[in-house]
Amino acid sequence: MSLCAAAFFASPVYAAAPAFAPAIVYDFGGKFDRSFNQSASEGAEKFKKETGIAFREFEISNPAQREQALTQLARRGATIIVAVGFTQASAVEKVAKQFPAVKFTIIDATVDLPNVQSVNFREQESSFLCGMAAALVSKIGKIGFVGGMDIPLIRKFALGYVEGAKFVNPKIEILQNMTGTTPAAWGDPTKGAELAKSQFGRGADVIFHAAGATGIGVMQAAKDAGRLSIGCDSNQNYLHSGGVLTSAVKAVNVAVHKTFLDAKNGSWKPGVIALGLAEDGVGYALDEHNRKLITPEIEARLNQARADIVSGKIKVSEYKAQ
């Protein structure tokens, strides 16, 4: 444990709590993972910049710290705590029961308690559009997917990607690999690169990752092979400008910013929130870094599909664990 973390957990003195004290606990990969956690961090920083209100934050390095961090933040006077990631669900459930006056928001999981707000995303919808894009640019009809930890959430990404690709080309082949079955799967760029190289070696010319920091290795492997990658969670087009077809984005930053703002303004409510294309909670990224890759014709196809998903004309399947 770092000295900072040791001090955080060891301090027996709690300062007087301010009227409003937001906090955030990041999951494995850290706040600078250039993906899921970083998006959450950007939302918190935007709130700080707009309001001048500082927030407490903690980056875990082992599973036990989830509950410890949430407990200490609550004891130290945090009034709203955002827990980033589905792996924090059990810790949030336990700590929220112990501190019923504290508000908790968990991202990517559902905890049914009167002081917990659960924010989930329909990732399969943005993944569908990314699958379409991959199929539209693939020259040989073979694309790939590299997931992080093998969990239902990542299977949602994979399912949407496959359905989108087959919507364009029913005969397309999609290679799939998961990085692992433990949280370490989110922070292994080397393994991500190995899996991507294997898929490129088998003929894939576009690979979509949904693997957190592990995906950085996937994207680097694509650059090295002269192939295309698709980013995830935040807009990663800039990482290899001209070599990233697009990114499946989800508005974790918006969710965190809104959580803090609503809690400050008194409009925060518990319960489950689901964000998809219709709510602008997910989407695909288009900017100067991939403008030459997403032609006007491809953009038109993607935007029509987006509209059809929102209207219900296109039904994207919801992954159901066996």
Image (cartoon, rainbow, N blue to C red):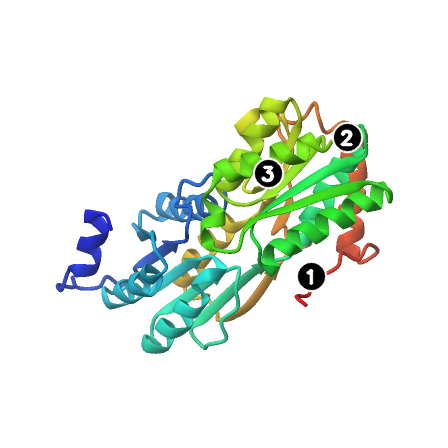
Identify which residue is drawn at 43% across, 69% down. Answer: 90
Q: Determine the CA span between mark 3 and mark 2.
A: 21 Å
Q: Position of residue 91 (x, y in %)?
A: 39, 68
Disc number placed over residue 137 in the picture, else none: 2
Determine whether the residue tagged by mark 2 lies in a helix, strand or loop.
Answer: helix
Q: Position of residue 133 (x, y in %)?
A: 74, 37
Q: Which residue was labeled with disc 3?
A: 195
Identify which residue is drawn at 21% across, 59% down. Answer: 9
- Crowd around label 3: few <14 · some 14–19 · many ≥20 (10 Å): many
On screen, residue 248 versus residue 315, left or right, reads: left
Q: Quadrant of residue 226?
A: top right
N-term-proximal mark, 3 vs 2: 2
Determine whether the residue tagged by mark 1 lies in a helix, strand or loop.
Answer: loop
Q: Determine the CA span between mark 3 and mark 1.
A: 23 Å
Q: Nearer the viewer, mark 3 or mark 2?
A: 3
> Can you say which quadrant of the picture contains the C terminus?
bottom right
Q: Amino acid at mark 1?
A: Tyr
Q: Determine the CA span between mark 2 and mark 1.
A: 26 Å
Camera-side residue of 177 and 320: 177
Q: Nearer the viewer, mark 3 or mark 1?
A: 3
Q: Which residue was labeled with disc 1?
A: 319
N-term-proximal mark, 2 vs 1: 2
Q: Amino acid at mark 3?
A: Leu
**Rendered position, 87 above or below 49:** below
Q: Position of residue 73 (x, y in %)?
A: 28, 62
Q: Position of residue 257 (x, y in %)?
A: 45, 52
Identify which residue is drawn at 56% across, 25% down. Answer: 240
Please report contact status of discs 2 and 1: CB closer than 8 Å, yes or no: no
